[in-house]
Image (cartoon, helix red, strand yellow):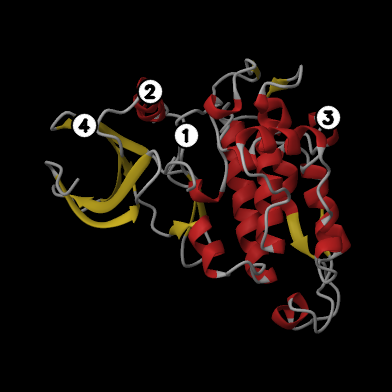
Amino acid sequence: MTELPGYVLESSLREGGEFIVHRGRRRTDSCPVLVVALAAEQPSPQSLRRLEHEFSLEADLDAAWATRPLALTHHEGRTMLVLKDPGGVPLDRILEKCHGQPIELTRFLRIAIGLATALGEVHRHGLIHKDLHPANILVDDADNVRLTGFGIASRLPRERQAPLTPEVIAGTLPYMAPEQTGRMNRSIDSRSDLYALGVTFYEMITGTLPFEATDPIGWVHCHIARQPLPPSERLTVIPGSLSAIVMKLLAKNAEDRYQMSERLASITVGKSRPVNVSAAWHGSTRPAGVTLSERRPQPPTQGLGKRA
C-alpha cells in the first residue's frame, strides 16, 4: 500500500504478520494518523472483523490512553482502519533494542505506571482488551503510553472461551491468560488482561519471557501448568517487592491476581537512599525498593497487529 485518498503516507511502522501499519497525515488538516491495512491479498473474514470491531469502539476509546479510530475506509478492494497517531514506537521495538537485556529500571517504572493507568481506563470503560502485548503498546519519547490493537476487545464483563485448537484462538499465545486458552473452566474478564500485563512486565525487567515454547500447544501448556521462575531469581538485582508484583499478576487463577488494574497504577519507587539505578540494574548495587499501594477503585465513567 503506497497511497490512500485523503491521506499522505510517510513511513512504515510495521510490516509482516496479519496487518501492516503506515504512519502519515490527513490532507485536510495534517492530523497525524496510523493506517492499519490487512497484509493478505485475500484476508480472512476474522481479520476483516477485527478492523471493523476496533472501529466500532470509537466512542469508547480516548486519545489520552488509546489510539482512537478516525475512519474505516476502502480503497482498491482493501479495507483500512485509520487511527489518530499519538506518536511513539511499539514497546516490542524498544525491547528488541535492549538485545535480551532488561530495560533500565527508572524507565521501566515510568512505562509500567503509564501502562497500568491506560489499562485501568480500558477496564473503567467496560472493555477487556484480550490482546495486550508489547506490539500493541505505543511509548513516546516522554514514556507516555497509548494502547492499540483493540480488534478482539470485548464489551462484556465476562465471556467464556470455547475450547478451540490453539492455532485459531484469538490473541497472542505467549501473553495469553490461562482462562483465555479455553482449556480451563473459567471465564475471561479484566483480570485476564492483568496476566498479559504480568508477562509484559516480566519481559521488560528480565529481558526474556517467563516461558519458552516452540508451538501453540506448548504455549498453552506453559500458561496452564508451568510456574515461571520469579524475576528476582532470574536476576538477583531485581527488588523482591517488584518480583512479587509480577508473580501475583502471573497467578494461574484469576482470584489470586490483583482484582483491578487501578491498584497497579500506584507502583512507586520506594523512598530509600538514592542509588545509581542504571548501575544497580546491572549488578553494581541493589536498586531502591518498589512498592505497591492499594488504592480504592474509582467508579466507572462511562491494535497494531500481532507481534511477529
Tag 1 residue = 150
Tag 3 residue = 255
Marks 2 and 3 sit apart, C-alpha to C-alpha, by 32 Å
Question: Residue 2 location in percent, x, y?
Answer: 16, 49
| Amino acid type for the residue under numbered disc 3 | Glu
**Relative to 49, residue 144 above or below:** below
**Relative to 7, residue 241 above or below:** below
Marks 2 and 4 sit apart, C-alpha to C-alpha, by 13 Å
Marks 1 and 2 sit apart, C-alpha to C-alpha, by 11 Å
Task: Please give the name of the residue rendered at 40% of the width and 28% of the height, measured from the top-left corner.
Answer: 50
Marks 3 and 4 sit apart, C-alpha to C-alpha, by 43 Å
Res 80 visible: yes
| Amino acid type for the residue under numbered disc 4 | Arg
Mark in the foreground, 4 or 1:
4
Mark positioned earlier in the residue sequence (3 or 4): 4
| Amino acid type for the residue under numbered disc 2 | Arg
Secondary structure of the residue carrying tag 1 is: loop
Secondary structure of the residue carrying tag 3 is: helix
Q: Nearer the viewer, residue 13 or 164?
A: 164
**Relative to 183, residue 233 above or below:** below
Q: Residue 99 got which mark?
A: none
Tag 2 residue = 49
Q: Nearer the viewer, residue 63 or 90?
A: 90
Secondary structure of the residue carrying tag 2 is: helix
Mark positioned earlier in the residue sequence (2 or 3): 2
